[in-house]
Protein backbone atom coordinates (compact mmCIF):
# COMPACT_ATOMS: atom_id res chain seq x y z
CA UNK A 1 0.00 0.00 0.00
CA UNK A 2 1.04 3.57 -0.62
CA UNK A 3 1.82 5.74 2.37
CA UNK A 4 -0.72 8.39 3.33
CA UNK A 5 -0.25 11.81 4.92
CA UNK A 6 -2.43 14.62 6.22
CA UNK A 7 -1.98 17.93 4.44
CA UNK A 8 -4.80 19.96 5.95
CA UNK A 9 -7.16 20.03 8.92
CA UNK A 10 -10.17 22.11 9.86
CA UNK A 11 -12.58 22.31 12.74
CA UNK A 12 -15.57 24.18 14.09
CA UNK A 13 -15.84 25.03 17.73
CA UNK A 14 -17.58 22.27 19.67
CA UNK A 15 -20.55 23.27 21.81
CA UNK A 16 -24.28 23.88 21.97
CA UNK A 17 -24.41 25.59 18.58
CA UNK A 18 -28.09 26.45 18.31
CA UNK A 19 -27.77 28.76 15.34
CA UNK A 20 -25.81 26.35 13.13
CA UNK A 21 -27.20 23.43 11.14
CA UNK A 22 -25.39 20.18 10.45
CA UNK A 23 -24.84 21.45 6.92
CA UNK A 24 -23.23 24.62 8.29
CA UNK A 25 -20.88 22.62 10.50
CA UNK A 26 -19.79 20.27 7.72
CA UNK A 27 -19.17 23.21 5.38
CA UNK A 28 -17.11 25.16 7.92
CA UNK A 29 -14.82 22.29 8.89
CA UNK A 30 -14.44 20.98 5.35
CA UNK A 31 -13.67 24.37 3.80
CA UNK A 32 -11.11 25.15 6.51
CA UNK A 33 -9.29 21.88 5.80
CA UNK A 34 -9.31 22.47 2.05
CA UNK A 35 -7.93 25.98 2.49
CA UNK A 36 -5.18 24.83 4.84
CA UNK A 37 -4.19 22.03 2.44
CA UNK A 38 -3.76 24.62 -0.32
CA UNK A 39 -5.81 22.62 -2.79
CA UNK A 40 -8.80 23.30 -5.01
CA UNK A 41 -12.10 21.50 -4.59
CA UNK A 42 -11.72 19.89 -8.02
CA UNK A 43 -8.58 18.11 -6.79
CA UNK A 44 -10.57 16.15 -4.19
CA UNK A 45 -11.39 12.73 -5.63
CA UNK A 46 -13.63 11.29 -2.90
CA UNK A 47 -15.49 12.44 0.19
CA UNK A 48 -16.07 10.45 3.40
CA UNK A 49 -18.47 11.58 6.11
CA UNK A 50 -18.45 10.13 9.62
CA UNK A 51 -21.82 10.59 11.33
CA UNK A 52 -23.65 8.49 13.90
CA UNK A 53 -27.36 9.25 13.67
CA UNK A 54 -28.51 12.37 11.87
CA UNK A 55 -31.75 10.54 11.15
CA UNK A 56 -32.68 10.59 14.84
CA UNK A 57 -31.07 13.91 15.76
CA UNK A 58 -32.24 16.08 12.84
CA UNK A 59 -34.34 13.73 10.64
CA UNK A 60 -31.80 13.82 7.81
CA UNK A 61 -30.63 10.80 5.85
CA UNK A 62 -28.61 10.34 2.61
CA UNK A 63 -25.83 12.17 4.38
CA UNK A 64 -22.81 11.79 2.12
CA UNK A 65 -24.07 13.88 -0.82
CA UNK A 66 -25.78 16.18 1.69
CA UNK A 67 -22.37 16.90 3.23
CA UNK A 68 -20.51 17.06 -0.05
CA UNK A 69 -22.99 19.56 -1.41
CA UNK A 70 -22.54 21.76 1.63
CA UNK A 71 -18.82 21.98 0.84
CA UNK A 72 -19.31 22.48 -2.90
CA UNK A 73 -18.01 19.09 -4.02
CA UNK A 74 -19.49 17.62 -7.19
CA UNK A 75 -19.19 14.55 -9.40
CA UNK A 76 -17.16 12.46 -6.95
CA UNK A 77 -17.88 9.36 -4.84
CA UNK A 78 -19.42 10.29 -1.46
CA UNK A 79 -19.52 7.74 1.34
CA UNK A 80 -21.25 7.88 4.74
CA UNK A 81 -19.56 5.83 7.49
CA UNK A 82 -21.33 4.92 10.76
CA UNK A 83 -19.75 3.22 13.75
CA UNK A 84 -21.34 4.86 16.78
CA UNK A 85 -18.78 7.06 18.60
CA UNK A 86 -16.04 5.71 16.33
CA UNK A 87 -17.70 6.91 13.11
CA UNK A 88 -15.11 9.62 12.48
CA UNK A 89 -12.05 7.41 12.88
CA UNK A 90 -13.66 4.74 10.71
CA UNK A 91 -14.23 7.32 7.97
CA UNK A 92 -10.55 8.28 8.11
CA UNK A 93 -9.56 4.62 7.91
CA UNK A 94 -11.68 4.15 4.79
CA UNK A 95 -9.99 7.17 3.20
CA UNK A 96 -6.55 5.82 4.07
CA UNK A 97 -7.37 2.43 2.55
CA UNK A 98 -8.65 4.02 -0.66
CA UNK A 99 -5.53 6.13 -1.15
CA UNK A 100 -3.25 3.30 -0.08
CA UNK A 101 -4.85 1.01 -2.66
CA UNK A 102 -4.29 3.57 -5.40
CA UNK A 103 -7.94 4.44 -6.04
CA UNK A 104 -7.42 8.12 -5.21
CA UNK A 105 -4.62 10.58 -4.51
CA UNK A 106 -6.55 13.09 -2.38
CA UNK A 107 -9.69 12.64 -0.29
CA UNK A 108 -11.56 14.79 2.22
CA UNK A 109 -12.87 13.28 5.45
CA UNK A 110 -15.34 15.11 7.69
CA UNK A 111 -16.82 13.95 10.97
CA UNK A 112 -19.91 15.82 12.17
CA UNK A 113 -22.86 15.62 14.54
CA UNK A 114 -25.72 17.93 15.52
CA UNK A 115 -26.98 16.66 18.88
CA UNK A 116 -28.48 19.61 20.74
CA UNK A 117 -31.64 19.65 18.66
CA UNK A 118 -33.20 17.24 21.20
CA UNK A 119 -33.58 16.94 24.96
CA UNK A 120 -30.89 15.32 27.10
CA UNK A 121 -33.23 12.39 27.74
CA UNK A 122 -33.81 11.81 24.02
CA UNK A 123 -30.10 12.11 23.22
CA UNK A 124 -29.25 9.62 25.96
CA UNK A 125 -31.70 7.11 24.50
CA UNK A 126 -30.37 7.59 20.95
CA UNK A 127 -26.80 7.07 22.14
CA UNK A 128 -27.86 3.96 24.07
CA UNK A 129 -28.94 2.42 20.77
CA UNK A 130 -25.22 2.03 19.99
CA UNK A 131 -25.36 -0.72 22.61
CA UNK A 132 -27.48 -3.86 22.65
CA UNK A 133 -31.10 -2.74 22.49
CA UNK A 134 -32.56 -6.09 23.48
CA UNK A 135 -30.37 -6.93 26.46
CA UNK A 136 -29.36 -3.46 27.66
CA UNK A 137 -31.59 -0.56 26.63
CA UNK A 138 -34.83 -2.48 27.17
CA UNK A 139 -33.56 -3.32 30.65
CA UNK A 140 -32.99 0.37 31.36
CA UNK A 141 -29.22 0.47 30.76
CA UNK A 142 -27.75 3.61 29.20
CA UNK A 143 -24.06 4.37 28.73
CA UNK A 144 -23.75 6.34 31.99
CA UNK A 145 -25.10 3.34 33.89
CA UNK A 146 -22.89 0.91 31.95
CA UNK A 147 -19.75 2.92 32.61
CA UNK A 148 -20.78 3.44 36.21
CA UNK A 149 -20.83 -0.34 36.51
CA UNK A 150 -17.43 -0.54 34.79
CA UNK A 151 -16.03 2.03 37.22
CA UNK A 152 -17.31 0.12 40.24
CA UNK A 153 -15.77 -3.10 38.96
CA UNK A 154 -12.42 -1.37 38.29
CA UNK A 155 -12.52 -0.01 41.83
CA UNK A 156 -13.22 -3.50 43.18
CA UNK A 157 -10.50 -5.26 41.18
CA UNK A 158 -7.72 -2.67 41.31
CA UNK A 159 -8.45 -0.33 44.18
CA UNK A 160 -9.23 2.61 41.93
CA UNK A 161 -10.63 5.51 43.92
CA UNK A 162 -13.07 8.34 43.39
CA UNK A 163 -10.06 10.67 43.67
CA UNK A 164 -8.54 9.03 40.59
CA UNK A 165 -11.64 9.72 38.51
CA UNK A 166 -11.66 13.31 39.76
CA UNK A 167 -8.03 13.78 38.71
CA UNK A 168 -8.96 12.93 35.12
CA UNK A 169 -11.80 15.46 35.13
CA UNK A 170 -9.66 18.22 36.63
CA UNK A 171 -6.84 17.62 34.13
CA UNK A 172 -9.11 17.59 31.10
CA UNK A 173 -10.98 20.71 32.17
CA UNK A 174 -7.63 22.46 32.66
CA UNK A 175 -6.54 21.42 29.16
CA UNK A 176 -9.88 22.40 27.64
CA UNK A 177 -9.57 25.87 29.17
CA UNK A 178 -6.55 26.33 26.88
CA UNK A 179 -8.43 25.18 23.77
CA UNK A 180 -10.45 27.83 21.88
CA UNK A 181 -12.43 25.08 20.10
CA UNK A 182 -13.54 23.36 23.32
CA UNK A 183 -17.16 23.16 24.44
CA UNK A 184 -16.27 23.90 28.07
CA UNK A 185 -13.33 26.28 28.52
CA UNK A 186 -13.38 26.37 32.29
CA UNK A 187 -11.07 24.93 34.92
CA UNK A 188 -12.52 23.08 37.89
CA UNK A 189 -10.85 22.40 41.21
CA UNK A 190 -10.27 18.98 42.68
CA UNK A 191 -12.42 19.94 45.66
CA UNK A 192 -15.30 20.99 43.42
CA UNK A 193 -15.30 17.64 41.63
CA UNK A 194 -14.98 15.62 44.81
CA UNK A 195 -17.80 17.50 46.53
CA UNK A 196 -20.21 17.30 43.60
CA UNK A 197 -23.46 15.59 44.54
CA UNK A 198 -25.03 15.63 41.07
CA UNK A 199 -24.86 11.87 40.62
CA UNK A 200 -25.49 10.50 37.11
CA UNK A 201 -24.74 6.81 37.65
CA UNK A 202 -22.89 5.88 40.82
CA UNK A 203 -19.97 6.55 41.17
CA UNK A 204 -20.11 8.91 38.16
CA UNK A 205 -21.22 12.51 38.65
CA UNK A 206 -21.69 15.17 36.00
CA UNK A 207 -17.94 15.85 36.15
CA UNK A 208 -17.23 12.29 35.02
CA UNK A 209 -19.39 12.40 31.90
CA UNK A 210 -18.65 13.75 28.43
CA UNK A 211 -20.73 16.50 26.90
CA UNK A 212 -23.62 16.58 24.44
CA UNK A 213 -22.04 18.68 21.72
CA UNK A 214 -22.51 19.93 18.18
CA UNK A 215 -19.48 20.24 15.92
CA UNK A 216 -17.47 19.06 12.95
CA UNK A 217 -13.83 18.28 12.17
CA UNK A 218 -12.10 17.57 8.87
CA UNK A 219 -8.84 16.27 7.42
CA UNK A 220 -7.45 16.19 3.89
CA UNK A 221 -5.62 12.93 3.17
CA UNK A 222 -3.04 12.72 0.41
CA UNK A 223 -0.70 10.10 -0.99
CA UNK A 224 2.62 10.83 0.74
CA UNK A 225 4.53 10.80 -2.54
CA UNK A 226 2.55 13.87 -3.65
CA UNK A 227 2.50 16.04 -0.53
CA UNK A 228 5.38 18.27 -1.60
CA UNK A 229 3.10 19.64 -4.32
CA UNK A 230 0.72 21.12 -1.76
CA UNK A 231 2.18 22.11 1.59
CA UNK A 232 5.30 22.14 3.72
CA UNK A 233 3.86 20.99 7.06
CA UNK A 234 2.74 17.40 6.52
CA UNK A 235 1.97 14.68 9.02
CA UNK A 236 2.53 11.07 8.01
CA UNK A 237 0.08 8.38 9.07
CA UNK A 238 2.31 5.55 10.26
CA UNK A 239 -0.45 3.06 11.00
CA UNK A 240 -4.09 2.53 11.83
CA UNK A 241 -5.44 -0.50 13.66
CA UNK A 242 -9.06 -1.54 14.01
CA UNK A 243 -10.64 -4.35 16.03
CA UNK A 244 -14.00 -5.36 17.44
CA UNK A 245 -15.24 -7.05 20.60
CA UNK A 246 -18.44 -8.47 22.02
CA UNK A 247 -21.32 -6.13 21.27
CA UNK A 248 -23.11 -6.92 24.52
CA UNK A 249 -21.69 -6.20 27.95
CA UNK A 250 -22.84 -9.52 29.39
CA UNK A 251 -20.72 -11.40 26.84
CA UNK A 252 -17.43 -9.76 27.87
CA UNK A 253 -14.97 -11.77 29.94
CA UNK A 254 -13.71 -8.69 31.80
CA UNK A 255 -15.52 -5.36 31.77
CA UNK A 256 -12.47 -3.51 33.14
CA UNK A 257 -10.65 -3.80 29.82
CA UNK A 258 -11.68 -3.19 26.22
CA UNK A 259 -10.24 -6.03 24.15
CA UNK A 260 -10.87 -4.17 20.90
CA UNK A 261 -8.63 -1.33 22.10
CA UNK A 262 -5.86 -3.76 23.06
CA UNK A 263 -6.02 -5.52 19.70
CA UNK A 264 -6.26 -2.33 17.64
CA UNK A 265 -3.34 -0.82 19.55
CA UNK A 266 -1.20 -3.92 19.04
CA UNK A 267 -1.93 -3.77 15.32
CA UNK A 268 -1.00 -0.09 15.14
CA UNK A 269 2.21 -0.51 17.15
CA UNK A 270 3.30 -3.49 15.06
CA UNK A 271 2.68 -1.81 11.71
CA UNK A 272 4.44 1.37 12.84
CA UNK A 273 7.33 -0.55 14.40
CA UNK A 274 6.81 1.32 17.66
CA UNK A 275 5.99 0.63 21.30
CA UNK A 276 3.87 2.57 23.80
CA UNK A 277 6.91 4.36 25.25
CA UNK A 278 7.57 5.91 21.80
CA UNK A 279 4.35 7.94 21.89
CA UNK A 280 4.82 11.62 22.77
CA UNK A 281 1.16 12.67 22.99
CA UNK A 282 -2.18 10.88 22.88
CA UNK A 283 -5.87 11.66 22.45
CA UNK A 284 -7.98 8.89 23.97
CA UNK A 285 -11.71 8.25 24.13
CA UNK A 286 -12.72 9.59 27.55
CA UNK A 287 -16.48 9.39 27.16
CA UNK A 288 -16.35 8.96 30.94
CA UNK A 289 -13.40 9.51 33.27
CA UNK A 290 -13.10 5.77 33.91
CA UNK A 291 -12.76 5.26 30.14
CA UNK A 292 -9.56 7.34 30.08
CA UNK A 293 -8.13 5.36 33.00
CA UNK A 294 -8.86 2.09 31.21
CA UNK A 295 -7.60 3.44 27.88
CA UNK A 296 -4.13 4.28 29.16
CA UNK A 297 -3.94 0.74 30.53
CA UNK A 298 -5.20 -0.93 27.34
CA UNK A 299 -2.88 1.18 25.18
CA UNK A 300 0.10 0.00 27.23
CA UNK A 301 1.06 3.35 28.72
CA UNK A 302 0.74 1.88 32.22
CA UNK A 303 0.24 -1.60 33.65
CA UNK A 304 -3.25 -2.96 34.13
CA UNK A 305 -4.78 -1.58 37.31
CA UNK A 306 -2.38 1.38 37.53
CA UNK A 307 -4.37 3.81 35.38
CA UNK A 308 -6.09 5.49 38.30
CA UNK A 309 -3.03 6.15 40.40
CA UNK A 310 -1.02 7.18 37.32
CA UNK A 311 -3.68 9.74 36.43
CA UNK A 312 -3.73 11.04 40.00
CA UNK A 313 0.08 11.37 40.08
CA UNK A 314 0.18 13.60 36.97
CA UNK A 315 1.66 11.09 34.51
CA UNK A 316 -0.88 12.14 31.87
CA UNK A 317 -0.76 15.90 32.43
CA UNK A 318 0.57 18.36 29.84
CA UNK A 319 3.98 18.13 31.50
CA UNK A 320 3.74 14.44 32.39
CA UNK A 321 5.57 11.49 30.91
CA UNK A 322 2.71 10.73 28.49
CA UNK A 323 0.36 13.72 28.00
CA UNK A 324 -3.18 12.50 27.36
CA UNK A 325 -6.04 14.55 25.94
CA UNK A 326 -4.33 17.94 25.69
CA UNK A 327 -7.40 19.09 23.74
CA UNK A 328 -9.53 18.63 26.86
CA UNK A 329 -10.82 15.31 25.58
CA UNK A 330 -14.46 14.41 25.22
CA UNK A 331 -14.90 15.57 28.81
CA UNK A 332 -14.09 19.24 28.14
CA UNK A 333 -13.56 19.69 24.41
CA UNK A 334 -16.88 17.95 23.79
CA UNK A 335 -18.28 14.85 22.13
CA UNK A 336 -20.23 15.51 18.91
CA UNK A 337 -20.28 11.78 18.29
CA UNK A 338 -19.53 11.52 14.57
CA UNK A 339 -16.90 14.26 14.77
CA UNK A 340 -14.94 12.94 17.74
CA UNK A 341 -12.57 10.55 15.95
CA UNK A 342 -11.67 13.15 13.34
CA UNK A 343 -11.31 15.83 16.02
CA UNK A 344 -8.78 13.67 17.85
CA UNK A 345 -6.68 13.48 14.68
CA UNK A 346 -6.95 17.26 14.21
CA UNK A 347 -5.54 17.76 17.71
CA UNK A 348 -2.66 15.34 17.15
CA UNK A 349 -1.82 17.04 13.85
CA UNK A 350 -1.73 20.44 15.55
CA UNK A 351 0.44 19.05 18.34
CA UNK A 352 2.92 17.53 15.88
CA UNK A 353 3.06 20.82 13.94
CA UNK A 354 3.70 22.83 17.12
CA UNK A 355 0.44 24.70 16.55
CA UNK A 356 -1.44 23.86 19.77
CA UNK A 357 -0.82 27.13 21.59
CA UNK A 358 -0.97 27.06 25.39
CA UNK A 359 -1.57 23.29 25.44
CA UNK A 360 1.41 22.48 23.19
CA UNK A 361 3.45 19.41 24.14
CA UNK A 362 7.05 20.48 23.65
CA UNK A 363 8.96 18.44 21.09
CA UNK A 364 6.09 16.10 20.21
CA UNK A 365 6.99 14.06 17.13
CA UNK A 366 4.81 10.95 17.39
CA UNK A 367 1.15 11.01 18.40
CA UNK A 368 -1.61 8.46 18.92
CA UNK A 369 -5.38 8.76 18.66
CA UNK A 370 -7.76 6.22 20.21
CA UNK A 371 -11.44 6.23 19.31
CA UNK A 372 -14.04 3.60 20.19
CA UNK A 373 -17.72 2.98 19.69
CA UNK A 374 -20.45 1.78 22.02
CA UNK A 375 -19.16 -0.01 25.09
CA UNK A 376 -15.98 -0.95 23.25
CA UNK A 377 -17.45 -3.03 20.42
CA UNK A 378 -15.33 -1.08 17.91
CA UNK A 379 -11.92 0.51 18.44
CA UNK A 380 -9.51 2.34 16.15
CA UNK A 381 -5.97 3.37 17.05
CA UNK A 382 -4.04 5.67 14.73
CA UNK A 383 -0.37 6.61 15.01
CA UNK A 384 0.99 9.73 13.30
CA UNK A 385 4.46 11.24 12.91
CA UNK A 386 5.81 14.66 12.12
CA UNK A 387 7.28 14.36 8.62
CA UNK A 388 9.30 17.57 8.45
Image (cartoon, rainbow, N blue to C red):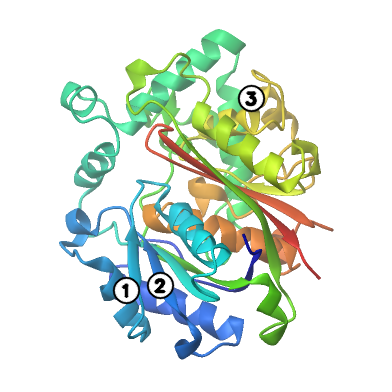
Q: Which residue is mark 1?
A: 67
Name the residue at the top extreme: 156
Using the rendered image of the protein, determine whether residue 98 is visible from the camera's viewpoint.
Answer: yes
Q: Quadrant of residue 179?
A: bottom right
| Residue 168 image point, x, y percent | 60, 36
How far apart are the alpha carbons under marks 3 and 1? 40 Å
| Residue 195 image point, x, y percent | 50, 28
Residue depicted at 49% across the width and 69% down the height: 218
Q: Which residue is mark 2?
A: 47
How far apart are the alpha carbons under marks 3 and 2? 40 Å
Mark 3 or mark 2, which is nearer to you?
2
65 or 373, which is in the foreground? Answer: 65
Residue depicted at 80% across the width and 38% down the height: 277
How far apart are the alpha carbons under marks 2 and 1? 9 Å
Residue 208 placement, left or right of 5: left
229 or 335, which is in the foreground? Answer: 229
Q: Quadrant of residue 45?
A: bottom left
- Is 282 situated above or below 356? above
| Residue 118 image point, x, y percent | 20, 54
Q: Which residue is mark 3?
A: 308
The numbered dot on residue 330 is none
At mark 3, the secondary structure is helix
At mark 2, the secondary structure is strand
Mark 2 or mark 1, which is nearer to you?
2
24 or 93, which is in the foreground? Answer: 93
Q: Residues within 10 Å of mark 2 (few under 14, many from 20)?
A: many
Q: Residues within 10 Å of mark 1 (few under 14, many from 20)?
A: many
Amino acid sequence: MRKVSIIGVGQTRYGNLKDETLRDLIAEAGCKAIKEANIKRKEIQAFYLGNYDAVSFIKQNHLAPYGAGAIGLKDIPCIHVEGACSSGALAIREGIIAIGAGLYDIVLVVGAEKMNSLSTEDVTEILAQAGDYETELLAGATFPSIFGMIARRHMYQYGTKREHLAAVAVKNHSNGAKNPDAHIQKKVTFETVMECDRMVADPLTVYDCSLISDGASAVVLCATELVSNFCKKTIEILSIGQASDSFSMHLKDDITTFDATVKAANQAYKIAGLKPSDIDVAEVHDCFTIAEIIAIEDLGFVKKGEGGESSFSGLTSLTGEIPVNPSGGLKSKGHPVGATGVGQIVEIVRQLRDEAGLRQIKGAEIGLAHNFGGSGATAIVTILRRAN
